[in-house]
Image: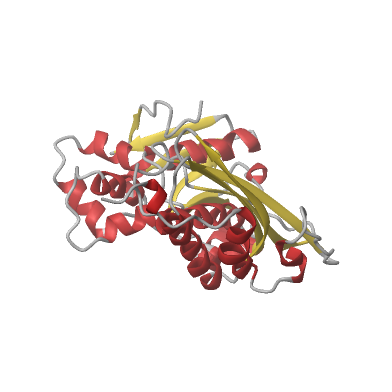
Amino acid sequence: MSGPEDRPAQPDEFAQIARLYRPLTRGAPEALGLLDDAAVIPQRPGFDLVITKDALVEGVHFPVGEARDLVARKLLRTNLSDLAAMGAAPYGYFLAVAWPAGTDFAAREQFAEGLRQDGEAFNLSLLGGDTVSISGPMVASLTLLGWVPQGRAVRRSGAQAGDLVMVSGPIGDGGLGLKAVMGQLGDSDGYLTGRYRQPRPRLDLIESLRDGASACADISDGLVADAGHIARASGVGLRLDLDRMPLSRPAAAWLADQPDRRQALMALATSGDDYELVLTAPPGRSERLGLPVIGVVEAGEGVQVLVDGRPAPTGPGGWTHA
C-alpha cells in the first residue's frame, strides 16, 4: 500500500499558474503572461467598462463533490448572466479560488479544463487572479469585465408605470434541476440537471435589450425576488401573472402532477438558478423584443403576484443571501 510519501509531488504555485492558467489567457496581452501581480486594461473610446463579481461556495451554491469542471463552467456562466442583463459584451475575467487543503492536482486540472471549454465558447480570456488553500469548503470567485456602448447600459432603475414585464425564457427549470441533481426528482433525458449545472447566459439578447428594455435583471435568486430588485431600484410596483409564465415541457409536466397548483407555480417562480432575464419595456418596444409578457409595471412599490387571477403570497420571493 502506498503512503503519502509515494504520491507524486504536486507542482508548486508558479508551476501550476504556468501549466493550468496561463493557457487560459489565450495570449491576451492585457494579462502580461500572468507574470505580474496585476493586469493592464486599455481604454476603449466610446464604451463603458462593466464589472461584475460573483462567488460560488461548495455546499451552498453547488453540491458537495460536484465535478470541478462543472463548477468552473457554472462560475463563468452565472457571471456572464449579470453582464447580459446590462446589455454588455464579455471581455475578460479575474479568478480567485480557495482550494480545500489537500485538493489534488487532478481536481485543479479538471477545474481549469472547464474554464478552458467555456473560455473558448464565450471568447473569454483570463486576465489574472489568485489561488489559496483553506481548511473549509471550496470557494471560487470570478470578476468579469464587459464593454457596453457609452451610456447604454441597461439598469434596474429605468422601469416606469405602463411598461410591460417580460421574461427571456422558461422559469423554474433551475430549481427543478437542483432537485434532480439531489436525487429528489427524475430527469431521464438530463434536461433539468443541464439547466441547473450549465445555465445559458442570454448574451444573444444584449443588442435588443439596449434598444428596447427600460430595466433588466437576471433571474438568479428567483423570478419574484429579482423582479423585486427592479421594483425597488425603479421606485415602482410590478404585477406578475404566473399563469402567463413560460414553462419548459418537463416543468409543465411536473406542475401537472402537483396537488396544489397555486403553491407549485409559486415554487417555480421563487426557486432561482434559472439565469434567464426579467425585463421591462414600453408597449411599443416590447413587441420588437418578442419575449413572453407576464405582467405590467404600476405606480406603487414591490411585487404583486397573481395566480388564477387572485393575489398569492410571495414570502421572501426567492433565495436570500443573509
Residue under the image location 40 percent in, 35 percent down: 305
Q: Quadrant of residue 183?
A: top left
Residue under the image location 55 percent in, 67 percent down: 119
Closest to the observer: 247 or 36?
36
Closest to the observer: 241 or 148?
148
Question: Is 315 placed above or below 283 here?
Answer: above
Residue 94 picture location, percent across and down: 65, 54
Q: Is residue 169 left or right of 258 when viewed as pictured?
A: right
Closest to the observer: 90 or 100?
100
Residue under the image location 69 percent in, 51 percent down: 51
Residue under the image location 83 percent in, 66 percent down: 46
Residue 300 picture location, percent across and down: 57, 29
Confirm whether residue 288 shows in the render: no
Q: Is residue 123 left or right of 295 when viewed as pictured?
A: right
Confirm whether residue 129 shows in the render: yes
Q: Quadrant of residue 7?
A: bottom left
Residue 11 picture location, percent across and down: 55, 58
Residue 233 picture location, percent across and down: 64, 36
